[in-house]
Structure formats: structure tokens, C-alpha cells
Image (cartoon, rainbow, N blue to C red):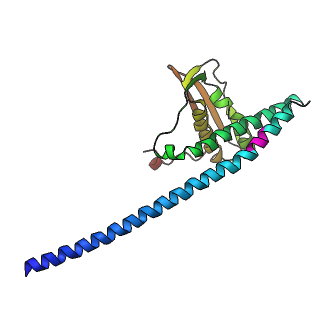
């Protein structure tokens, strides 16, 4: 009798495992379908955004060739620089699969460390002004050559500065300091915001 009960129990467990395996297979199929939808959506977004972005850049460059003041030319240069930054970010969307796989593409070159900030400061300055935050940029190091991915480093610094500005009350300040450190360089962002909760720093 005990042997019969054990056989019945094993058969029941086998059926349960078979049911779970079937559900898991369906879940995997659904995940695959959703992943394909995400990929198609990103491809569509990249395609649809690149066209107006190219127009913005093209018309800005045409205006730069016109007889405009130096101040207006600098504004146009800032627009072109921002479109280039956005273009890089859009290209990253096409590499999403590599990013998810932990294979983010890095393009290292030797360049002046100060350009990490110079590439993004025009847009960051406007963001700070809109929020009523004082952005203080200490003298940037000149001639400090480093080997790294200029765009990625600028992207990291941009995120740090924008977050600092976002959480800093109007009338307060955000300060950027860049300096040589050993054989490389360091960038420091100081703000007057709420800070980071201790539980988020562990």
C-alpha cells in the first residue's frame, strides 16, 4: 500500500512539474515577444528622431554662415554641440542589446580633460538659470591630457551636474571643480541640496 501511495505521489508531482514547465515556456515566449517589441520600438524612435535632429543641426550651421553677431554665433555653436550630444545618445539606443549584455562600447582617445566639461557646460548653464541655481565653475585645467572616452565622461559629468541642480533649492549654488590627480584628472560636484540618504551610500 505504501509503494502504491508513493507511486501516486510521484505521478502527481510529475504532473505539477510538467504544468510548471509549460507555464515557464509560455513566460519565456512572452518575454521574447516583449523584447522584440522593445527592439522594434527603439529602432523606430531612433529613425524618427534623427531626421528632425539633422534639420536642427543643418539650419543652425546655415545661420552660422550668415552675418550674425558673435553672441548669436556662440548660441548657434551651442545648439550644434547639443545636437551632437543628442546624436550620440540616440546612437546608444541602437547598442542597447550590448549595454544590457554588459558590453558597453568605449572609444578611448587622448584629449584635453577640460573638454569633458566644455562639451556640456552651455546646456548645463541654461538648466541652472531656469531653476534659479547659481552654477559656479572653477578654473578648468588647461593642457591636462588624459586617455579615455570623451563622450562617456562628459555624459557622466552631465548627469552629476543635472542631478545636483535638480535637488538644489533656488538661490543656492552648485560648484564644479576639475583638477589634475596623479596621472589623470578628477571632477568634483558640490551642491546645497538635500544630500544622499545614508542607506543609499552603502
- In this view, which residue lies farthest toward the bottom? 1
In the image shown, does 22 or 57 lie closer to the viewer? 22
* 101 sits left or right of 88 in the view: left
Residue 6 occupies quadrant: bottom left
User: Residue at left 51%, top 56%?
Assistant: 35
User: Residue at left 47%, top 39%?
Assistant: 103
Residue 21 occupies quadrant: bottom left
Would residue 27 be visible to someone looking at this image? Answer: yes
Count of labels in the image? 0
User: Residue at left 68%, top 33%?
Assistant: 136
Please say if 172 is above or below 138: below
Counting from the top left corner in percent of width and height, residue 42 is at 60, 52
In the image shown, does 90 or 124 lie closer to the viewer? 90
Would residue 170 be visible to someone looking at this image? Answer: no
- In this view, which residue lies farthest toward the top? 143
Counting from the top left corner in percent of width and height, residue 83 is at 72, 39
Please say if 48 is above or below 159: below
Q: Give the residues in magenta.
A: 53-57
Counting from the top left corner in percent of width and height, residue 77 is at 78, 32
Please say if 18 is above or below 72: below
In the picture, which quadrant includes the C terminus?
top left
The magenta stretch spans residue 56: yes
Please say if 109 is above or below 25: above
* 22 sits left or right of 172 in the view: left
User: Residue at left 65%, top 24%?
Assistant: 140
Q: Give the dominant element type of the magenta stretch: helix, strand or loop.
A: helix
- In this view, which residue lies farthest toward the right? 67
The magenta stretch spans residue 121: no
Counting from the top left corner in percent of width and height, residue 86 is at 67, 41
In the picture, which quadrant includes the N terminus?
bottom left
Amino acid at each position: 500500500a505504501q509503494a502504491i501511495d508513493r507511486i501516486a505521489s510521484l505521478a502527481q508531482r510529475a504532473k505539477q512539474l510538467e504544468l510548471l514547465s509549460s507555464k515557464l515556456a509560455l513566460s519565456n515566449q512572452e518575454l521574447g515577444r516583449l523584447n522584440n517589441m522593445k527592439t522594434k520600438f527603439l529602432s523606430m524612435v531612433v529613425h524618427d528622431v534623427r531626421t528632425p535632429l539633422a534639420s536642427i543641426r543643418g539650419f543652425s550651421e546655415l545661420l552660422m554662415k550668415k552675418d550674425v553677431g558673435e553672441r548669436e554665433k556662440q548660441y548657434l555653436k551651442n545648439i550644434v554641440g547639443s545636437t551632437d550630444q543628442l546624436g550620440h545618445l540616440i546612437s546608444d539606443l541602437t547598442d542597447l542589446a550590448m549595454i544590457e549584455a554588459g558590453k558597453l562600447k568605449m572609444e578611448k582617445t587622448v584629449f584635453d580633460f577640460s573638454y569633458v566639461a566644455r562639451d556640456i557646460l552651455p546646456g548645463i548653464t541654461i538648466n541652472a538659470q531656469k531653476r534659479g541655481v547659481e552654477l559656479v565653475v572653477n578654473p578648468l585645467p588647461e593642457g591636462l591630457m588624459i586617455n579615455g572616452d570623451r563622450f562617456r565622461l562628459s555624459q557622466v559629468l552631465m548627469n552629476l551636474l543635472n542631478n545636483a541642480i535638480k535637488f538644489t533649492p533656488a538661490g543656492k549654488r552648485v560648484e564644479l571643480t576639475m583638477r589634475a590627480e596623479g596621472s589623470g584628472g578628477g571632477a568634483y560636484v558640490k551642491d546645497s541640496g538635500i544630500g544622499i540618504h545614508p542607506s543609499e551610500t552603502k
